[in-house]
Image (cartoon, grey):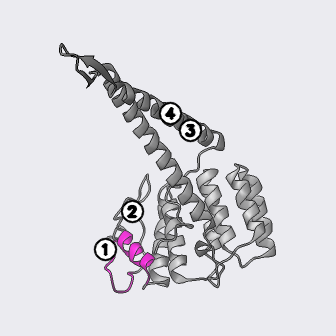
Amino acid sequence: MRNAYIFPDGHHDMKPWLKITLYTVLAGLLVWTTTGFIRSYRLATATTSVTNTEGETASIRVNNKEAQSRMSMFGFGGLLAVLGLGLMLSRDISHWFATRTTDFLYNDNLEGMQNPDFDRAEAAAMQGNYMDAVGMLRDFLKKNPREIYAQIRIAEIYENELKNYLAAALEYEDLLQHKFNGDRWGWAAIHLANLYSGKLDKPDQTLAWLRRIATEYPETGPAKKARERLGLPETGSLPPPQEPPPSSGGLPPGFSPKKRSK
């Protein structure tokens, strides 16, 4: 299963001030539309008493079309506010679990880990102090070199928050020198290959990592994905290395290496 902690899938955390502003605006919009809807509903459903010629009194509803129109407008605005708040909350909750759930924090023995030093570094990152967080994670790694989940977090900060894709790739390169669970190693390598083929536009490195994944852990899900990218059959040995075709961009989905002419 693809690890949500290693693969944020394009998650880019917005600036704290922008997040607070959006929450405030959406919450204010929800309060305003809710209040307006209630008032309009009362006006739209209001009744008045009438007396007929025989002296009998009856209550009839006033046909207030203006109130009905405002009620619809406020209802639509409230729905938009609820949807906006729901999307932001679900995004933040997912990110919180992705960065804190111990099931996604592993050392090279695949033991779930929690550490107050790591939590302090994560808190710094959540406050937007990304370089401070990287420094704290580096110090943590010096004291705990086997806790490779901290190095994964450094790579994520470089990629998602600092947009330094080369630094993120080098961090993954260093991380993948460790040998740990083959499936998790493979997905981390797939993520690195995606960096090389996309943001960094380095098809040679992409091809090399895809071949390495398919060779070193052939029975895993990442190896299957690598074979698909390489245009190789599901089973069987890899062909001899071949030169990648010249390209001005990254490798597209379904990339197949160009065959050498005889």
Query: Could you tell which of marks 4 and 2 lies nearer the N-terminus?
Result: 4
Amino acid at circle 2: Pro
Mark 1: secondary structure: loop
Q: Residue at x 59, y 46 (%)?
A: 14
Query: Could you tell which of marks 3 and 4 lies nearer the N-terminus?
Result: 3
Task: Name the spot of residue 54 as percent of width and height, x first.
Answer: 18, 16
Amino acid at circle 4: Leu
Q: Give the labeled residue for mark 1.
A: 262
Marks 3 & 1, CB-CB < 8 Å contact: no
Task: Name the spot of residue 7 as percent of width and height, x first.
Answer: 52, 64
Query: Horizontally, is 182 left or right of 40 in the view?
Result: right
Residue stretch rendered in magenta on the structure = 220-239
Query: Could you tell which of marks 2 and 3 lies nearer the N-terminus?
Result: 3
Q: Nearer the viewer, mark 1 or mark 2?
A: 2
Residue farthest to the front, as pictured: 54
Mark 3: secondary structure: helix
Mark 2: secondary structure: loop
Compute the Cα span from label 2 to label 3.
46 Å
Mark 2: few/some/many CA within 10 Å (<14, 14-19, 20+): some
Q: Give the labeled residue for mark 4.
A: 29
Q: Give the labeled residue for mark 3.
A: 22
Compute the Cα span from label 4 to label 2.
54 Å
Query: Could you tell which of marks 1 and 2 lies nearer the N-terminus?
Result: 2
Compute the Cα span from label 1 to label 2.
16 Å
Marks 3 & 4, CB-CB < 8 Å contact: no
Of the numbered discs in the image, which one, if any, rests on residue 245? Answer: 2
Task: Name the spot of residue 245 as percent of width and height, x first.
Answer: 39, 62
